[in-house]
Image: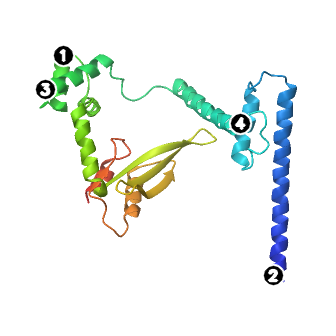
Amino acid sequence: MFSSLRHLVGWIFSAFGSRQDLVLENLALRQQLLDLHNQRPRGRLSARHKLFWVLLRKVWSGWQKPLILVTPRTVVAWHRAGFRLYWKYLSRTRRVVGRRPVSRDVRELIFRMAAENPTWGAPRIHGELLKLGFHVSEPTASRWLQRMPKSPDLGKRWLTFLRNHREGIAAMDFFTVPTLTFGVLYCFFIIDHGRRRILRFNVTRNPSSLWIVQQMREAWPYVAAQKFLLFDHDSKFGRDVIDAARI
Protein backbone atom coordinates (compact mmCIF):
# COMPACT_ATOMS: atom_id res chain seq x y z
CA MET A 1 0.00 0.00 0.00
CA PHE A 2 2.77 2.43 0.95
CA SER A 3 4.63 1.55 -2.25
CA SER A 4 1.57 2.33 -4.38
CA LEU A 5 1.01 5.62 -2.55
CA ARG A 6 4.65 6.61 -3.10
CA HIS A 7 4.39 5.87 -6.84
CA LEU A 8 1.16 7.86 -7.06
CA VAL A 9 2.70 10.90 -5.36
CA GLY A 10 5.77 10.64 -7.57
CA TRP A 11 3.61 10.48 -10.70
CA ILE A 12 1.67 13.58 -9.64
CA PHE A 13 4.86 15.59 -9.04
CA SER A 14 6.37 14.42 -12.34
CA ALA A 15 3.17 15.37 -14.18
CA PHE A 16 3.26 18.88 -12.74
CA GLY A 17 6.98 19.14 -13.51
CA SER A 18 6.48 17.97 -17.10
CA ARG A 19 3.62 20.46 -17.57
CA GLN A 20 5.79 23.31 -16.29
CA ASP A 21 8.57 22.36 -18.72
CA LEU A 22 6.03 22.20 -21.56
CA VAL A 23 4.65 25.65 -20.75
CA LEU A 24 8.14 27.18 -20.61
CA GLU A 25 9.16 25.48 -23.84
CA ASN A 26 6.05 26.81 -25.63
CA LEU A 27 6.80 30.27 -24.24
CA ALA A 28 10.38 30.10 -25.56
CA LEU A 29 9.24 28.98 -29.02
CA ARG A 30 6.57 31.72 -29.18
CA GLN A 31 9.19 34.29 -28.25
CA GLN A 32 11.38 33.17 -31.14
CA LEU A 33 8.42 33.35 -33.53
CA LEU A 34 7.86 36.95 -32.43
CA ASP A 35 11.52 37.70 -33.14
CA LEU A 36 11.11 36.32 -36.66
CA HIS A 37 7.94 38.34 -37.28
CA ASN A 38 9.75 41.53 -36.29
CA GLN A 39 11.99 41.00 -39.36
CA ARG A 40 15.11 42.22 -37.60
CA PRO A 41 18.53 41.50 -39.15
CA ARG A 42 20.03 38.19 -38.11
CA GLY A 43 21.55 38.34 -34.61
CA ARG A 44 20.06 41.76 -33.75
CA LEU A 45 17.45 41.05 -31.11
CA SER A 46 15.91 43.82 -29.06
CA ALA A 47 16.99 44.46 -25.48
CA ARG A 48 13.60 43.21 -24.24
CA HIS A 49 14.04 39.87 -26.02
CA LYS A 50 17.58 39.50 -24.72
CA LEU A 51 16.32 40.13 -21.17
CA PHE A 52 13.68 37.42 -21.69
CA TRP A 53 16.34 34.80 -22.48
CA VAL A 54 18.57 35.87 -19.60
CA LEU A 55 15.65 35.47 -17.15
CA LEU A 56 14.58 32.15 -18.69
CA ARG A 57 18.10 30.84 -18.27
CA LYS A 58 17.89 31.49 -14.52
CA VAL A 59 14.45 29.97 -13.88
CA TRP A 60 14.47 26.92 -16.19
CA SER A 61 17.18 24.26 -16.37
CA GLY A 62 16.05 23.13 -19.85
CA TRP A 63 16.32 26.57 -21.45
CA GLN A 64 18.84 25.37 -24.07
CA LYS A 65 16.49 22.81 -25.74
CA PRO A 66 14.17 25.16 -27.68
CA LEU A 67 16.92 27.58 -28.75
CA ILE A 68 16.92 28.08 -32.52
CA LEU A 69 17.76 31.71 -33.33
CA VAL A 70 20.77 32.01 -31.02
CA THR A 71 23.24 29.72 -29.27
CA PRO A 72 23.45 29.19 -25.48
CA ARG A 73 26.84 30.90 -25.52
CA THR A 74 25.19 34.05 -26.90
CA VAL A 75 22.65 34.12 -24.04
CA VAL A 76 25.44 33.78 -21.48
CA ALA A 77 27.31 36.63 -23.20
CA TRP A 78 24.20 38.84 -22.93
CA HIS A 79 24.05 38.25 -19.19
CA ARG A 80 27.72 39.14 -18.79
CA ALA A 81 27.26 42.29 -20.87
CA GLY A 82 24.33 43.33 -18.70
CA PHE A 83 26.44 42.74 -15.58
CA ARG A 84 29.17 45.03 -16.92
CA LEU A 85 26.71 47.77 -17.92
CA TYR A 86 25.00 47.64 -14.52
CA TRP A 87 28.20 48.18 -12.54
CA LYS A 88 29.48 50.75 -15.05
CA TYR A 89 26.30 52.73 -14.51
CA LEU A 90 26.66 52.54 -10.73
CA SER A 91 30.29 53.65 -10.85
CA ARG A 92 29.31 56.74 -12.84
CA THR A 93 26.29 57.76 -10.76
CA ARG A 94 27.68 57.16 -7.28
CA ARG A 95 29.55 59.93 -5.53
CA VAL A 96 33.29 59.34 -5.56
CA VAL A 97 34.62 58.74 -2.05
CA GLY A 98 37.84 57.45 -0.52
CA ARG A 99 41.45 58.33 -1.26
CA ARG A 100 42.43 60.66 -4.06
CA PRO A 101 44.07 58.81 -6.96
CA VAL A 102 47.87 58.94 -7.11
CA SER A 103 49.15 60.43 -10.35
CA ARG A 104 51.40 58.45 -12.66
CA ASP A 105 54.32 60.87 -12.12
CA VAL A 106 54.20 60.31 -8.34
CA ARG A 107 54.04 56.53 -8.79
CA GLU A 108 57.07 56.57 -11.08
CA LEU A 109 58.91 58.79 -8.60
CA ILE A 110 58.22 56.30 -5.77
CA PHE A 111 59.50 53.42 -7.92
CA ARG A 112 62.61 55.40 -8.89
CA MET A 113 63.44 56.30 -5.27
CA ALA A 114 63.07 52.66 -4.20
CA ALA A 115 65.22 51.39 -7.11
CA GLU A 116 68.03 53.90 -6.55
CA ASN A 117 67.93 53.56 -2.73
CA PRO A 118 67.27 49.90 -1.82
CA THR A 119 67.56 50.60 1.93
CA TRP A 120 64.80 53.20 1.94
CA GLY A 121 61.44 52.14 3.26
CA ALA A 122 58.01 53.74 3.12
CA PRO A 123 58.70 56.27 5.97
CA ARG A 124 61.83 57.63 4.29
CA ILE A 125 60.22 57.84 0.84
CA HIS A 126 57.15 59.50 2.39
CA GLY A 127 59.39 62.15 3.97
CA GLU A 128 61.24 62.81 0.70
CA LEU A 129 57.94 63.21 -1.15
CA LEU A 130 56.77 65.78 1.39
CA LYS A 131 60.03 67.73 0.91
CA LEU A 132 59.35 67.79 -2.83
CA GLY A 133 55.83 69.09 -2.29
CA PHE A 134 53.88 65.89 -2.95
CA HIS A 135 51.26 65.33 -0.25
CA VAL A 136 51.09 61.52 -0.19
CA SER A 137 50.45 59.57 3.01
CA GLU A 138 52.87 56.95 4.29
CA PRO A 139 50.38 54.04 3.86
CA THR A 140 49.92 55.10 0.21
CA ALA A 141 53.67 55.08 -0.35
CA SER A 142 53.88 51.65 1.28
CA ARG A 143 51.06 50.32 -0.92
CA TRP A 144 52.78 51.45 -4.11
CA LEU A 145 56.10 50.06 -2.96
CA GLN A 146 54.44 46.65 -2.77
CA ARG A 147 53.30 47.08 -6.39
CA MET A 148 56.75 48.01 -7.62
CA PRO A 149 57.81 45.97 -10.70
CA LYS A 150 60.10 43.14 -9.74
CA SER A 151 63.32 42.24 -11.51
CA PRO A 152 63.51 38.97 -13.55
CA ASP A 153 66.01 37.50 -11.07
CA LEU A 154 63.50 37.78 -8.23
CA GLY A 155 60.92 35.97 -10.35
CA LYS A 156 63.31 33.08 -11.01
CA ARG A 157 64.13 32.77 -7.32
CA TRP A 158 60.42 32.70 -6.49
CA LEU A 159 59.74 29.90 -8.99
CA THR A 160 62.63 27.92 -7.52
CA PHE A 161 61.18 28.33 -4.06
CA LEU A 162 57.76 27.11 -5.22
CA ARG A 163 59.26 24.01 -6.86
CA ASN A 164 61.44 23.09 -3.88
CA HIS A 165 58.76 23.57 -1.20
CA ARG A 166 55.53 22.75 -3.05
CA GLU A 167 54.67 19.92 -0.62
CA GLY A 168 54.61 22.41 2.25
CA ILE A 169 52.73 25.26 0.51
CA ALA A 170 49.03 26.10 0.52
CA ALA A 171 47.37 29.16 -0.98
CA MET A 172 44.00 30.87 -0.54
CA ASP A 173 42.17 33.44 -2.61
CA PHE A 174 38.77 34.63 -3.87
CA PHE A 175 37.11 34.71 -7.26
CA THR A 176 33.75 36.33 -8.03
CA VAL A 177 30.58 35.10 -9.75
CA PRO A 178 27.90 37.56 -11.00
CA THR A 179 24.25 36.87 -10.09
CA LEU A 180 21.03 37.47 -12.01
CA THR A 181 20.36 40.68 -10.06
CA PHE A 182 23.90 41.93 -10.89
CA GLY A 183 25.18 41.20 -7.41
CA VAL A 184 28.46 39.47 -6.66
CA LEU A 185 29.14 36.16 -4.91
CA TYR A 186 32.62 35.77 -3.41
CA CYS A 187 33.94 32.22 -3.83
CA PHE A 188 36.73 31.36 -1.40
CA PHE A 189 39.12 28.42 -1.77
CA ILE A 190 42.26 26.98 -0.19
CA ILE A 191 44.45 24.77 -2.39
CA ASP A 192 47.32 22.43 -1.57
CA HIS A 193 50.15 23.15 -4.03
CA GLY A 194 51.76 19.74 -3.64
CA ARG A 195 48.86 17.69 -5.00
CA ARG A 196 46.65 20.49 -6.41
CA ARG A 197 43.93 19.43 -3.97
CA ILE A 198 41.16 21.79 -2.82
CA LEU A 199 41.25 21.83 0.99
CA ARG A 200 38.31 24.21 1.52
CA PHE A 201 35.69 25.89 -0.64
CA ASN A 202 32.81 28.17 0.36
CA VAL A 203 30.70 31.05 -0.95
CA THR A 204 29.54 34.26 0.74
CA ARG A 205 28.11 37.64 -0.17
CA ASN A 206 29.98 39.53 2.57
CA PRO A 207 33.51 38.22 3.14
CA SER A 208 35.28 39.36 6.29
CA SER A 209 38.45 38.51 8.20
CA LEU A 210 36.59 36.51 10.84
CA TRP A 211 34.77 34.52 8.16
CA ILE A 212 38.09 33.68 6.48
CA VAL A 213 39.59 32.60 9.81
CA GLN A 214 36.68 30.17 10.30
CA GLN A 215 37.28 28.71 6.82
CA MET A 216 40.95 28.20 7.70
CA ARG A 217 39.97 26.31 10.85
CA GLU A 218 37.65 24.05 8.89
CA ALA A 219 40.30 23.41 6.22
CA TRP A 220 42.64 21.87 8.82
CA PRO A 221 40.35 20.62 11.62
CA TYR A 222 42.49 17.72 12.91
CA VAL A 223 45.80 17.94 11.02
CA ALA A 224 48.60 20.46 10.97
CA ALA A 225 48.52 23.05 8.21
CA GLN A 226 51.19 23.45 5.56
CA LYS A 227 54.33 25.32 6.57
CA PHE A 228 53.71 28.17 4.12
CA LEU A 229 50.34 29.82 3.41
CA LEU A 230 50.22 32.22 0.45
CA PHE A 231 47.67 35.00 -0.03
CA ASP A 232 47.68 38.48 -1.55
CA HIS A 233 47.39 41.96 0.00
CA ASP A 234 43.60 42.12 -0.29
CA SER A 235 42.02 44.10 2.52
CA LYS A 236 39.82 41.08 3.34
CA PHE A 237 42.94 39.29 4.63
CA GLY A 238 43.22 41.53 7.66
CA ARG A 239 45.10 41.27 10.94
CA ASP A 240 42.89 38.43 12.23
CA VAL A 241 43.79 36.30 9.21
CA ILE A 242 47.51 37.01 9.59
CA ASP A 243 47.43 36.12 13.29
CA ALA A 244 45.55 32.89 12.56
CA ALA A 245 48.08 31.92 9.85
CA ARG A 246 50.97 32.32 12.31
CA ILE A 247 49.48 29.89 14.86
How many residues crowd mark 2 within 10 Å: few (<14), some (14–19), many (20+)? few
> Local crowd at mark 1 within 10 Å, few (<14), some, or many (≥20)?
few
Q: Position of residue 64 (x, y in %)?
A: 73, 44
Residue 102, given in percent of the width and then of the height, sits at 33, 22
CA–CA distance between discs 1 and 2?
Answer: 87 Å
Regarding mark 2 in the picture, which secondary structure is present there?
helix
- Which kind of residue does numbered mark 1 sit on? Leu
Q: Quadrant of the N terminus?
A: bottom right
Quadrant in which the C terminus is drawn? bottom left
Which residue is nearer to you in this view: 42 or 233? 42
> Which mark is in front, 1 or 2?
2
Q: Which residue is mark 2?
A: 2
First reached walking from the N terminus: tag 4 or tag 1: 4
Q: Nearer the viewer, mark 3 or mark 1?
A: 3
Q: Which numbered disc, 2 or 3, marks the residue that appears first in the sequence? A: 2
Mark found first going from the N terminus, 3 or 4 = 4
| Mark closest to the chain's N terminus, 3 or 1 | 3
Label 1 belongs to which residue?
132
* Residue sitting at x 38%, y 45%: 236
Q: Is residue 188 left or right of residue 239?
A: right
Q: Secondary structure at mark 4?
A: loop
Q: Give above or below for 82 relative to 60.
A: above
Which kind of residue does numbered mark 3 sit on?
Answer: Asn
Q: Give the alpha-carbon distance from disc 2 to disc 3, as whole Å.
A: 83 Å
Query: Which dot marks residue 71?
Result: 4
Residue under the image location 77 percent in, 45 percent down: 65
Give the amino acid at mark 4: Thr
Labelled disc at residue 117 = 3
Q: Earlier in the sequence, mark 4 or mark 2?
A: 2
- The answer to whether 108 is drawn above or below residue 201 in the figure is above
